[in-house]
Image (cartoon, rainbow, N blue to C red):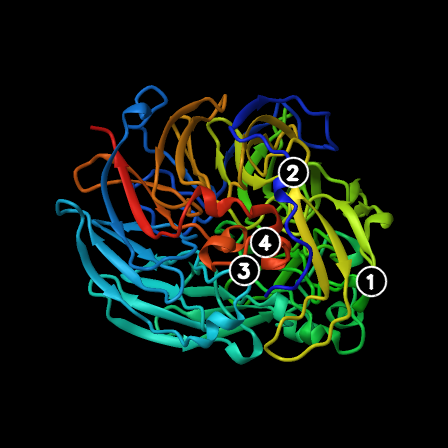
Amino acid sequence: MTRRGAIALLLSIAWLGACRKHVHSEPAAQNPWLDAAAKVSLGTGTPAEDDGQWTMPAKDYANTRYSRLTQITPENVKDLKLVWSQKTGVEGGHEAAPLVVGRTMYVVTPFPNHVLAFDLEKPGSPPKWTYEPKPVPAARGVACCDLVNRGMAFWEGRIYMNTLDDFTIALDAATGAEVWRTKLGEVTRGETITMAPLVVKGHVLVGNSGGEMGVRGWLTALDAKTGSIAWRAWSTGPDRDVLIGPEFKPHYASDRGADLGVRTWPVEQWRIGGGTVWGFVSYDPELDLIYYGTANPGPWNHEARPGDNKWTAGIFARRPSDGAAIWFYQWSPHDVYDHDGVNENVLFDATSADAKTRKVLAHADRNGYVYVLDRVTGEVLSAAPFVHVSSSNGVDLASGRPNMVAALAPTTGKVTRNICPASAGGKDWQPMSFSPHTGLLYIPHQNLCMDEEGLESNYVEGTPYVGANTRFYPGPGGHRGVLTAWNPMTARKVWSIDENFPVWSGTVATATDVVFYGTMDGWFKAVHARTGAELWKFKTDSGVIGQPVTYRGPDGKQYIAVLDGVGGWAGAVVSNDLDPLDGTGAIGFVHAMADLKNATKKGGAVYVFALP
């Protein structure tokens, strides 16, 4: 998906090559309820004790990516050694988190979506079995932004996975035998699946990708035992399709009214309006609600779709049993910049100084703000910028809407410059972690701005439907990546580490105040959770964009694992062999990443570390 344009200006843009650490005290943000005296605790989606396994994409239903294991500490992490490594046999963007169930590790690759099971009891952890689902090659031609897969889920003896060509598959975890497979979408429409499934109350939850192809988004629940479809909730269209009924009670007035999924669009535009679902799903067992984001409206050229474009670029709370919508909040009404809305939602409880406890969720959006919402009602409690933002001036807590800068809204045939953050956002899919021990979120993200020109766009099924030329470049400071420690109670940055390239990996936090993350030039790092001080690092063969995990092995030791294999939207210049001189490649991301080919190479391997 490239367009011709000017030669990349990257070499003329100064950036600071070495990573740098900053301790910050940013201006106070809007925060009418949360305060510095508030205490945090894990949400109800987290078990009371850590069994040492990693059985779902984010460790727990609350999406914390927090481990209570304690053997690896800030004092001894410097002694971590590589204990085994295995190539996956596939090169490309490896964005998944390994699963660890009992004495087996499971890894899924990008297309062709091989699944590998490693025996953790034997020296070197050799493969136990491999499963090859053989997705149709046509899926490669319609996948936006690389051929990634973001992980799998385990439930009651089965591994659940998605393929790029729109199948959800259940495997016998012991043997790798296929138990069932169900087709959910159509590649000919430009539809693919890249997300990690989640199993809630016997339902496998799966969403689609393809917002840049005019795909209409949905979240589907399948019976985990049989693979039959239990319900599907569309992200656009009439209330009956969106599963909006009597229980739907959004907090903000702009989200109330009949059939807003039709009436906030031009006639029939909602049928090709995007709102795909390819991020992570959270679940609160006590409230019995799932939470997930809906992606950008299509096309990117917003002049083609006047209106708020419900229910895109927002978050739904639904019942897992029947999909009934309970509330919705829109991060970016009438999303102008592909700022999307699918980033993960981390659940925890907050107790204020006057001992009132509130169930909240934290979300770092592509539009540049970290939000804290009441997850019972969908009310925004705070929204503060975590990156440089020029496209809006804060979020109005009364209406819930960002105050957009009209002069920076792109128009057809005219280049609008200095839009921050870029379409990839202050943060994209790469998941943050949350430590109740420090009370901080650990946000991996980028520092990118862009120029954009609107283009005429016509919908043709199965072809790109974008309507915009964009070119990304580094934001203030010249670096392209950041790891930020953020206090959601005060809505302030605590410390940050600048990285040369976007930090496109996930993070994991431990009870001993160690945070792990990877860099696109191939460093896997451990830093102190309270200060950001670098404690350890290891150079992998390829860039790291996977999600680290930590687990207890059969020998009782704590291990750290991560996949390398550079790629994804940010790394497509390497994984898809794009021309670094064509800055329009990867919808303008290549303009900011032309030098990545000099820093790393393709790869695909799992690395496992432990103390001696």
Secondary structure, mark 1, is: loop
586 vs 561, nearest the viewer? 586
What residue did someone put label 2 on? 13
76 vs 22, nearest the viewer? 22
Tell me the amino acid under the disc marked 2: Ile
Residue 346 coordinates in the image, percent (x, y): 53, 44
Secondary structure, mark 2, is: loop
- Which of discs 3 and 4 lies nearer the camera? The answer is 4
Q: Earlier in the sequence, mark 4 or mark 1?
A: 1
Label 1, label 3: how far apart the Cα atoms are: 25 Å
Q: Which mark is residue 413?
A: 1
What residue did someone put label 4 on? 581
On the question of residue 216 being in view, the answer is no
Q: Are marks 1 and 2 in contact (CB under 8 Å)?
A: no
Q: Quadrant of the N terminus?
A: bottom right
Q: Are marks 3 and 2 in contact (CB under 8 Å)?
A: no
What residue did someone put label 3 on? 145
Q: Which mark is residue 3?
A: none
- Which of discs 1 and 3 lies nearer the camera? The answer is 1
Q: Are marks 1 and 3 in contact (CB under 8 Å)?
A: no
On the question of residue 390 being in view, the answer is yes
Tell me the amino acid under the disc marked 1: Gly
Seen in the picture, residue 345 relative to 109 is either above or below; the reply is above
Q: Residues within 10 Å of mark 1 (few under 14, many from 20)?
A: few
Label 4, label 1: how far apart the Cα atoms are: 23 Å
